[in-house]
Amino acid sequence: MANEEFFPQVREAVAEALGLDEEEVTPDATLLDELGAESIDLLDMLFRLERTTGVKIQASDLASYVQGGIPDEEFGDEEKDVITPAGMTQLKTVMPQLVHLDLDGKLQPEKVMSYFTVQNLVDLVASRAATVSS
Amino acid sequence: MARFARLLREHPGAAPDLFTAVELAGCAGKRRWTEHLAARFAAKEAVLKALGTGLGPRMRWTDIEVANDPEGRPIVFLGGAVAARADACGFRQVCLSLTHTADFAIAQAAAVRGNNADLSWLARDGGTKAVDQCAFT
């Protein structure tokens, strides 16, 4: 799934939105935790990416991408406040960095996006670009 | 506030993506219109957090509309995927408080399950004022 085509544009958008040097924006850096992005920064990144790539991504598309069409009640166990096994299988597909983190049965839904990396964003842009062009 | 102003300035398409026509019209012509819009954006985030969802799949920022009642108090209208999610979770009302200065926009929201009658315990003076203020998270 790892894609490099849009990495330069994503790196530039992330760096400009967060006021970072591009060298700080590495593929495995998490947007929210390590790079410190907040909701408004995410919007800034997505608008910059739309301008440079022509691919429009709504903020909610990130949640749609990681959830992969699985209904909310099947993706998260509300009673236990954790991602379901089906949800974890989906997450590991689009966020392969989770495979080695021993989060099965432990990952809370509100924590999912804290693991979202620059590379995940690159892959999302590539995925949406492919959808638009097909 | 500075980051929000920069967002609107550098991305002209942002405003219609984030705000409904009612919200944009409500802030248009006001001298500190950026502050008013920033407060409404903060309100949308607060509402989503109060609902416990964040911006989930298929949700749009415009699914949450912040307006003012005749007394000028902020009120929230939900639509689209946000309304569907709130309804599925049993929420029947969202209470909101906003404030803004030149540097900050702050919003507090409380999502309430049930109907207004369930809020009667908040009315210490027996009137409606305490109920209108609601409890904020």
Image (cartoon, helix red, strand yellow):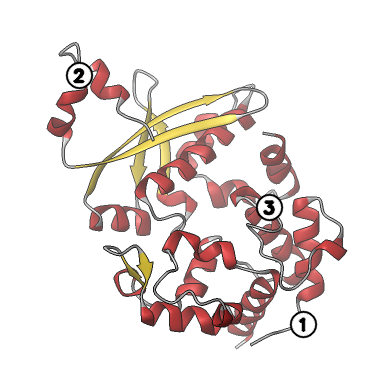
> Which label belongs to residue B123?
2
Q: CA distance from mark 1 to mark 3?
A: 24 Å
Could you tell me which secondary element the residue under label 3 belongs to?
Answer: loop
First reached walking from the N terminus: tag 1 or tag 3: 1
Disc count in the image?
A: 3
Q: Is residue B78 visible?
A: yes
Image: A59 above or below A19 = below
Q: Position of residue B46 (x, y in %)?
A: 45, 41
**In the drawing, does residue A47 fall left or right of residue B29?**
right
At horizontal 38% and vertical 23% (from top left) the residue drawn is B73
Judged by depth in the image, the label closer to the viewer, 1 or 3, is: 3
Q: Position of residue A18 (x, y in %)?
A: 75, 52
At horizontal 46% and vertical 50% (from top left) the residue drawn is B62
Q: Amino acid at mark 2?
A: Ala
> Which label belongs to residue A5?
1
Q: Quadrant of the N terminus of chain B?
A: top right
Residue at image mark 3: A36
Q: Amino acid at mark 1?
A: Glu
Q: Amino acid at mark 3?
A: Gly
Judged by depth in the image, the label closer to the viewer, 1 or 2, is: 2
